[in-house]
């Protein structure tokens, strides 16, 4: 559960850093957070027109799936076979491309009391290490995790979402910008 929590925190850190944020000088205007930098070569114009933050979220999911593929190949020792090695190379290329693609986006200008350096590289490394350790867990550990996650999610969705101060503040901000 701790490894999964650390993975979720690292993924959320990437998502929050690339989410658009209101400018301090003019709260009605959002900053460049999540938009693809226009000076990056080989970037499709379709992706530039995509909603800010959406391409980062999709790429993060692809990166996590590629990291999971790497972890499964290592934990099963399948990467020693020729087709496993080809899959390993494919997953490594996809994950590296995902990290560089996320880095091709503007980070938001939100002022924080603390900031993690080397975003998205350090959180991506954290996600990779956590997933590699999770793929080494036993079957019973996964069963216990699923049971406790179901209990936690039930509590969160029944009580937490409706009583979250952050959610209420976010809704107020979205109404102000609409």
Image (tube, rainbow, N blue to C red):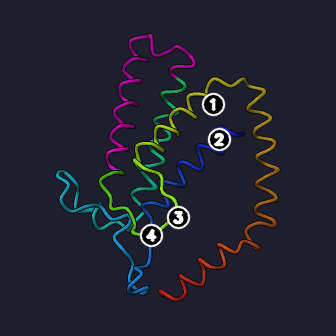
Q: Are marks 1 and 2 in contact (CB under 8 Å)?
A: yes
Q: CA distance from mark 2 to mark 3?
A: 25 Å
Residue at image position (76%, 63%) is: 157
For discs 1 and 4, the disc positioned in front in the rendered view: 4
Q: Earlier in the sequence, mark 1 or mark 4?
A: 4
Q: Earlier in the sequence, mark 3 or mark 1?
A: 3
Magenta stretch, main secondary structure class: helix
Residue 134 x %, y %: 63, 30
Circle 4 crowding by C-alpha within 10 Å: few under 14, some 14–19, many from 20: some
Quadrant in the rendering for residue 25: bottom left
Instruction: Please give the residue where the numbered disc 1 appears in the rendered image.
Output: 134
Q: Is residue 95 magenta?
A: yes
Residue 47 x %, y %: 29, 60
> In which quadrant will I find the N terminus?
top right
Instruction: Please give the residue where the numbered disc 2 appears in the rendered image.
Output: 4
Q: CA distance from mark 1 to mark 2?
A: 8 Å
In-front residue for pair 18/65: 18
Residue 51 x %, y %: 38, 68
Q: Are marks 4 and 2 in contact (CB under 8 Å)?
A: no
Q: Earlier in the sequence, mark 1 or mark 2?
A: 2
For discs 4 and 2, the disc positioned in front in the rendered view: 4
Q: CA distance from mark 1 to mark 4?
A: 33 Å
Residue 119 x %, y %: 41, 50
For discs 4 and 3, the disc positioned in front in the rendered view: 3
Q: Are marks 1 and 4 in contact (CB under 8 Å)?
A: no
In-front residue for pair 118/42: 118
Q: CA distance from mark 3 to mark 1?
A: 31 Å
Residue at image position (53%, 82%) is: 174
Instruction: Please give the residue where the numbered disc 3 appears in the rendered image.
Output: 113
Q: Which mark is residue 110?
A: 4
- Would residue 114 be found to the left or right of residue 157 on screen? left
Q: CA distance from mark 4 to mark 2?
A: 27 Å
């Amino acid at each position: 559960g701790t490894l999964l929590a650390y993975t979720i925190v690292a993924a959320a850190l990437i998502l929050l850093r690339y989410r658009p944020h209101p400018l301090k000088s003019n709260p009605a205007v959002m900053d460049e957070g999540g938009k693809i930098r226009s000076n990056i070569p080989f970037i499709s114009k379709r992706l530039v027109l995509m909603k800010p933050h959406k391409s980062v979220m999709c790429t993060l999911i692809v990166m996590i799936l590629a990291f999971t593929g790497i972890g499964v190949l290592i934990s099963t020792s399948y990467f020693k076979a020729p087709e496993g090695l080809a899959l390993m190379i494919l997953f490594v290329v996809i994950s590296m491309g995902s990290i560089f693609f996320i880095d091709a986006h503007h980070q938001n200008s939100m002022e924080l009391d603390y900031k993690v350096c080397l975003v998205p590289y350090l959180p991506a490394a954290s996600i990779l290490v956590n997933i590699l350790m999770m793929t080494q867990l036993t079957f019973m550990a996964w069963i216990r995790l699923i049971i406790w996650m179901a209990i936690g999610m039930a509590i969160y969705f029944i009580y937490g979402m409706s009583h979250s101060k952050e959610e209420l503040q976010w809704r107020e901000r979205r109404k102000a910008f609409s």
